[in-house]
Image (tube, helix red, strand yellow):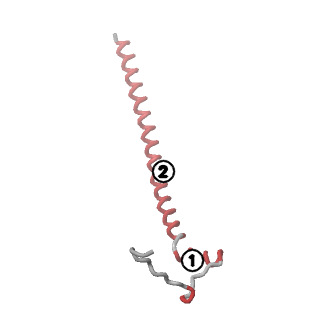
């Protein structure tokens, strides 16, 4: 009877230890994933800011002028068109 009780105690203790070990591993993995998620979100914000900066007019215009030979037209080179009214083509 005592031996059976001891065996049951050892089995229950082993199950509790195994469950706690599994929970600890999962907790550590969850913490690592949360840290990685925070790092990636921070990097995403940084990249979005770089995209906004790189696509601003102050960056695009000089690039277009230098690489593509484009330029802003002078007033004399612009033609203003009137919008067509709704009843006429």
Q: Position of residue 60 (x, y in %)?
A: 56, 74
Q: Position of residue 62 (x, y in %)?
A: 59, 78
Q: Is residue 39 above or below residue 60?
A: above
Query: Which quarter of the picture shows residue 15?
Result: top left
Mark 2 or mark 1, which is nearer to you? 1
Local packing at callout 1 (Cα closer than 10 Å; few below 14, some 14-19, many 20+) is some
Give the residue displayed 57% in from the left and 84% down from the top: 73
Q: Position of residue 41 (x, y in %)?
A: 46, 56
Query: Which quarter of the picture shows residue 27?
Result: top left
Q: Position of residue 84 (x, y in %)?
A: 44, 77
**For this view, does 55 lie left or right of residue 18?**
right
- Taking depth in this image into account, of 54 and 72 the one nearest to the observer is 72
Of the 4 image quadrants, the one containing the C terminus is: bottom left
> Which element carries disc 1, helix, strand or loop?
helix
- Taking depth in this image into account, of 26 and 9 the one nearest to the observer is 26
> Which element carries disc 2, helix, strand or loop?
helix
Q: Earlier in the sequence, mark 2 or mark 1?
A: 2
Q: Are marks 2 and 1 in contact (CB under 8 Å)?
A: no
- Taking depth in this image into account, of 80 and 73 the one nearest to the observer is 80
Q: Residue furthest bottom?
A: 76
In the picture, the disc for residue 41 is none
Q: Is residue 82 above or below residue 54?
A: below
Q: CA distance from mark 2 to mark 1?
A: 37 Å
Give the residue displayed 57% in from the left and 82% down from the top: 72
Local packing at callout 2 (Cα closer than 10 Å; few below 14, some 14-19, many 20+) is few
**Which residue is under mark 2?**
36
**Which residue is under mark 1?**
61
Give the residue displayed 53% in from the left and 70% down from the top: 55
Q: Is residue 76 above or below residue 67?
A: below
Of the 4 image quadrants, the one containing the N terminus is: top left
């Amino acid at each position: 009877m005592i031996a059976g009780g001891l065996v049951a105690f050892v089995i229950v203790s082993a199950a509790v230890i195994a469950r706690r070990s599994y929970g600890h591993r999962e907790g550590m993995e969850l913490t690592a994933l949360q840290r990685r998620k925070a790092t990636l979100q921070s990097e995403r914000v940084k990249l979005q800011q770089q995209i906004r900066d790189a696509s601003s007019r102050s960056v695009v215009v000089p690039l277009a002028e230098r690489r593509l030979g484009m330029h802003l037209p002078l007033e004399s080179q612009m033609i203003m068109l009137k919008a067509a009214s709704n009843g006429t083509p």
